[in-house]
Image: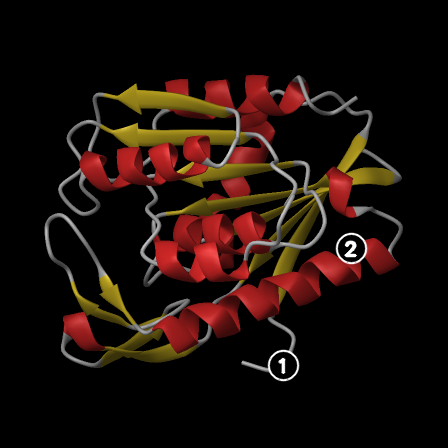
Amino acid sequence: MSHELECIELLHGADPRYAVIWLHGLGADGSDFVPVVPELGLAAQPGVRFVFPNAPEIPVTCNGDYVMPAWYDIVSLDPDSRRIDETGMIASCAAIRRLIARENARGIPCSHVFLAGFSQGGAVAYATALTHPEALAGIIALSAYLPVEALVEREALPGHAVPPVFAAHGSEDDVVAPALGRRARDFAQARGHAVHWHEYPMPHTLCLEEVEDIGRWLRERLV
């Protein structure tokens, strides 16, 4: 995945000083979370550029090798773990780093770039942000998990920056077990990240209360 990802961009306010790079889940595309932006309740200033990249289409082993948008191949969907193609995860992290660098080139420093993601996209957001050499503004991990703890431990630099985390999960999620979300939360907390954890009575999706909480968390950091 050496090419630049195709993205949908949405500008909230003028002269953006912040960017949110938001990664969709398995089988979805960049348009999935565009409707969420107006519901976040953000002020017109400071301006925020929302970037919604499209994952490449690849065969996914756990879905019978069906070709679909995916950030990496998932070998098995065990209830309490995920076996994945680590090479694919590394490639996706590199692709997201290129998007971060593009925001830097457009005048938005790493300290003003948030990484957000749902499910598989949240796993990539976690892995990228937890190993990024410069401090990011924050991580938004929704119904997410971290299947590459060993990779993060190898790649994280000594004294690595620790951006805050908004992590949320549905208590009735039967796709990504809540225990996997809590394990990712605990992993980040153990490395010094301030994690704001939320659980909602819902399956593998978003709810209005969650969107409102995301908006509140973002507003506190858009200064």
Res 170 quadrant in image: top left
User: Where's residue 146, x and y in %?
Assistant: 35, 50
Residue 70 placement, left or right of 59: right
* Residue 207 visible: yes
Whole-Å distance between the Cαs marked 2 and 1?
A: 16 Å
* Residue name at image x 63 percent, y 54 percent: 132
Q: Nearer the viewer, residue 65 or 100?
A: 100
Q: Amino acid at mark 2?
A: Glu
Nearer to me, 165 or 105: 165
Q: Amino acid at mark 1?
A: His
- Identify the residue under disc 1: 3
Name the residue that disc number 2 marks: 103
| Label tally | 2
Residue shown at the point (42%, 62%) measured from the top left: 151
Q: Which mark is residue 219?
A: none
| Quarter of the figure that contains the N terminus | bottom right
Q: Residue 135 at x, y = what percent?
A: 70, 43
Q: Position of residue 221 (x, y in %)?
A: 69, 23
Residue count near mark 2 (Cα–Cα under 10 Å), binned few <14, some 14–19, many ≥20: many
Q: Is residue 12 visible?
A: no
Q: Where does residue 92 sit, x and y in percent of width and height?
A: 50, 68
Q: Is residue 75 above or below residue 146?
A: below
Determine the image quadrant of residue 114: top right
